[in-house]
Each structure stands twice: as C-alpha cells, then as structure tokens.
Amino acid sequence: MDAKLINRKIYELYKQITLDNKLLVLLSEKEFYDLQIKSEVIYMFDGEEALGFVFFNIVEDKSYITFLYGKDDIKVKLLQNTEKILKEKNITSLWVSFFNPTALSWYPKPGIIHPTIQGVVLDSEEHQFYQKHGFINHTIEDTYYQKLSEFEVPNNIKKTIYENQTKGYNIEYYDEYKHHGLIDFCEEIHAPHWKKVILSNHALKNPLPLLVVTHFDKVVGFTGPLENQKNGRGYFAGIGVLQSYQGKKLGKTLFYRLCEELKLMGAQYMTLFTGRNNPAKHIYVSAGFVVVKSFMIIKKFLKGESNV
C-alpha cells in the first residue's frame, strides 16, 4: 500500500474507535496526520485492513503513549514492539500521563472540553488492560468542573480580601509600571511550567491580563493569564503564592477572583485537574467545583526499577 492509503486506513480506524468511546475530541484528518509526523508510530495491517496502531513520544529517558488502538491481542503486540524499541534506545520507563508533550482534548461532560487528558480513566477497561500487562499505578488525578453562571464570590471571601488589603495585600491585574518583582517571583516559585507561562505571556506585544497578588506592589502570587477560549472555557494555568507569604488565604482569594474575572469576560465554564492528594483541591471544592472524571497516571519501568 502507498502512504496515502495507509494514512487513510489508520485515520478511519482512529475515527471509528474515538467516536465509539465518546471521550476524546475527534481530530481532523489533517490534525491526526500532523500528530503522526511528530510522533513515534507503529502500525499493524492485515492486507489493506488496519488492525491497530500506537503513537508514542520520547522525552529524554521516558516515553509516553498517546494512542494504543486495536483489539486487545493487537494492542499486546503493539505494546511489545514499542517496549522492544524503547529498550534498544535505553529508555527507562513508559507512561500514560499528562506529561506527554501531546495533549489530547476530551469531554468531561457533553459539550464541555478540557485540553489535556491526564492518564487512563480510573478503573476502566483500558486501565485494567495496562495493569494486566505490567503497568503500575502512579497517582490519581481528578478533573473538576464549574459552570461560571452559577459562580458568586461569597461574603466570607470578600471579608478576607478586605482584611488582607488592610495589611498591604492586593489582588489586581499586573502592571509593569506599577508592580515589581515579577521575574524574581518566577525564579522563587520553583515551577518551570508556571515560569514559562508567565514570561512567554509577558514577552508578547499584547499580553493577556495576568492576575497577581501584591504586597506593597511586590508580586508574591499569580494566576492566569486570563482568556475566554473559543469553546467557552475559562483558561486556567495554575495558582502560585510564594512560600513565605502562604497561610494568609491569598491563594484561595486569588482563585475566587480568577473565577469572577473569567465570568465577567464571558467564559461559560472552567475545568481543571489536580492530584487527589493535593491540598489545593479544597479551594476548588469550596468554590463550587465538582469532580466529573478521575484518571490514573500509570507507568511501566523498562529497566532499573520493579513494576511490582
């Protein structure tokens, strides 16, 4: 078969399985092909019939599965071939995780889109398949949802905001001519992803608004950048407050302000995810967010550690 026919057959199989599962947002044929070019790919065919395929990415000494499609016996063969290739490349582990550089959008609820699937659906057939073939559980990640038309800042949060203001703490949009310490904050927060998000936005000719907590105009916390995405989702990159300023409910009040501002911008909903053991979940629950789906990050060590 020529390359065009192979691509078409693989896409048809991908489309069929994706629509049947009703979890992932379907990629267009071009999007799927572009992803294929950027990934490591193994196909299996019987004549002109596509039986299955695996897409995976290699990042330093780890690898991440994006798709493993086909019937179980086909997936086992694809997995075996993948592991063989990875071992030859001295890759130490294979994961299904949100750290995969390929982010797949999915539906937490009908018509609601979240931009990154976190792992395998907890206790699903897929989860059981991977466990049967040597993968072990790593962490549970919960996806939260809130309809912003139902969000209001309660009086106790307004009171806390006021009390903090009397002590020099403010939550406001970042203004480079008024505030100072943004670069220092990025270094001190020790979160490379947040640093990249903040500084990339700051470097734009027309940066998106960034909410910051300031203490006498020094940046000590952040959330944003704020954006009402095309699908109606209020963008959420995270919330961070310097350790020396924690314990004052700055993160909690900052999150409420974020939800309020995104609602005013016209965002219809917010989704986010966090580890089940992350104390930040209490902030989200207090703001009315509910868990709509749970995932398990899974891994298989290919060398150096035990999978037991």
Image (cartoon, grey):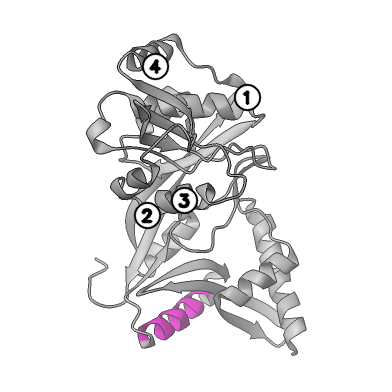
Sort mark 2 into few (<14), some (14-19) or many (20+) by Cα contacts within 10 Å: few
Of callouts 1 and 4, which one flags the residue occurring earlier in the amino acid sequence? 4
Do the CB atoms of the residues marked 3 and 2 lie less than 8 Å apart?
Answer: no
Q: CA distance from mark 1 to mark 4?
A: 19 Å
* Residue numbers of the magenta segment: 75-87
Tell me if mark 4 has few (under 14), some (14-19) or many (20+) residues whose alpha carbon lies within 10 angstroms of its own.
many
The kind of residue on which mark 2 rests is Pro
Give the quarter of the image for residue 242. Answer: top left
Cα gap from disc 4 to disc 3, whole angstroms: 27 Å
Q: Tag 4: residue type?
A: Ile
Q: CA distance from mark 4 to mark 2?
A: 28 Å
The residue pinned by badge 2 equals 192
Numbered marks: total: 4
Residue 58 appears at what percent x and percent y?
A: 44, 74
SS type, badge 4: helix
Q: Say if the magenta span includes residue 81.
A: yes
Can you give x and y, in whole percent of width and height, for residue 45 in the image? 65, 84
Q: Could you tell me how far apart the alpha carbons at marks 3 and 1 are, in whole angstroms?
A: 25 Å
| Magenta region, main secondary structure | helix
Where is residue 264 drawn, in percent x and y?
62, 24
**Nearer to us in this view, 186 or 18:** 186
Residue 193: % across, % down: 41, 53
Q: Nearer the viewer, mark 3 or mark 1?
A: 3
Residue, disc 4: 161
How far, Cα to Cα, is label 3 from label 2? 10 Å
Badge number at residue 264: 1
